[in-house]
Image: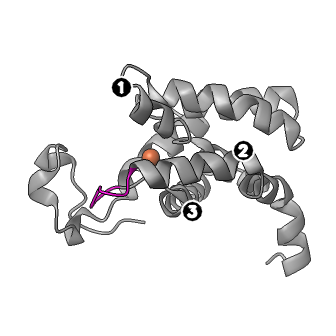
Amino acid sequence: MADKQTAAKQMERVNAILQHPGYQSWIIAINQAEMGRDFCRHGVEHALDVARIAYALWLDNGGNPVAKDIVYAAALLHDVGRWQEYEDPTVDHAEAAAELAEPLLLEVGYHPLVAAEIVKAVRLHRKGAPDGLAQVLYRADKLSRPCYLCPSRRKCNWPADKMNDELLY
Ligand SMILES: [Fe+2]
């Protein structure tokens, strides 16, 4: 198992995203827009739930453990466009998130080809993909919601057969 220093080194870029003033301002804007929302919020708690589940799925699918930070980066960024969608409902938050993510990923040091892979997964996170990073991100996003404990089930527009009735990850 990686010691703390090695783990921290591997997560350096993820921490740079979390500490980036732009990222923090997007999360604050989402938190403010969702203040009256009583279920399925999209703040950093959701982003971290998705990150951890996506990485578990990634490993279960035989993914390389070295890509941990890439999986986390995609998950942390997948919903950052939500605040734009709240301001203008014609905006697709996945598209908005992809636009916001790309320069930030380059700024924290990702190679343009790796950044492009992360941006592609962010862009596809609502539609899904047959495999790879986009697929685990899509699945983790769905699996992250504890519908089995949700007091607002009746208000939810998810079809009953899509709800998580048991914990898988
Ligand atoms: Fe999400």
Confirm or deny contact between disc 1 and disc 3 (CB under 8 A).
Answer: no
What is the distance, in whole Å, between disc 3 and disc 2 at their CAs? 22 Å
What is the distance, in whole Å, between disc 1 and disc 3 at their CAs? 29 Å
Residue labelled with disc 1? 89
Q: Residue furthest left?
A: 154
Residue labelled with disc 3? 52
Q: Residues within 10 Å of mark 2 (few under 14, many from 20)?
A: few
Residue type beneath disc 2: Gly
On the image, the x and y values in percent for residue 53 come to 51, 60
Mark carried by residue 22 = 2
Residue found 41% across the figure and 48% down from its top: 33
Specify which label sits upstream in the sequence, 1 or 3: 3
On the image, the x and y values in percent for residue 71 come to 66, 49
**Circle 1 SS class:** loop
Q: Quadrant of the N terminus?
A: bottom right
Residue type beneath disc 3: Arg
Whether the residue carrying mark 1 lies under 8 Å from ligand 1 is answered with no
